[in-house]
Amino acid sequence: MTGDIPWWELIVAACLLAGGFFLFVAGLGILRLPDVLIRMHASTKAGTLGVGLVFGAAALYFRNTADAAIAVLTIVFLLVTAPVAAHAIARAAYRMNVPLSGRTHLDEWKGKYGRDGDGRTDRAGTP
């Protein structure tokens, strides 16, 4: 049965299935996880991997230099911007006193950056 299907199409199918799975896990993590920091982690890690696999499959399927270049540039853009965006979201959420999960045992920034009223910051972000 697989004798008439090219090997690269099987790789494309595997990448699409794996990418879809990771995107599903990212969406499920956003819905099910308890606080904004953990949700942000799920969406950036699994979401970036899922989109990277889907775009990689598209680049392999179309086998066109322009399409492959766009896919590679998109993957690189996601790998560069996702950690920066996640850090900005986490920092803003923490400074706005968004509640942490009850399972969070260690808060290294407590009293320094917007928690408990001691570490209020001005608009420039300096204490």
Image (cartoon, rainbow, N blue to C red):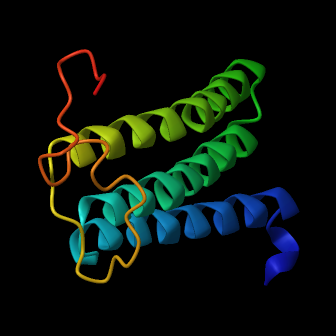
Q: Nearer the viewer, residue 30 or 119?
A: 119
In screen coordinates, is 82 left or right of 18?
left
Q: Residue at x 27, y 51 (%)?
A: 111
Q: Position of residue 125 (x, y in %)?
A: 28, 23
In-front residue for pair 50/123? 123
Residue at the spot x=77%, y=21% of the render?
Answer: 65
Q: Position of residue 6 (x, y in %)?
A: 84, 61
- Side of 115 relative to 66 (left or right): left
Classify residue 56 by image quadrant. Answer: top right
Relative horizontal placement of residue 67, taking residue 38 as reference (left or right): right
Identified at 34% across, 76% down, the residue is 104
Q: Is residue 37 above or below residue 77?
A: below
Along the line of sight, which residue is nearer the eye, 117 or 44? 117
Vertically, is 57 above or below 13? Answer: above
Residue at 40% in and 65% down: 26
Circle count: 0
Place of residue 121 in the rendered image (x, y in percent of width and height, measured from the top left): 20, 29
- Res. 122 image quadrant: top left
- Determine the image quadrant of residue 33: bottom left
Judged from this view, the residue extending furthest toward the left is 117
Along the line of sight, the residue nearer the viewer: 29 or 101: 101
Which quarter shows the N terminus? bottom right
In the picture, the quarter occupied by the C terminus is top left
- Residue sitting farthest toward the front: 118
Q: Residue 120 location, x and y as percent? A: 17, 36
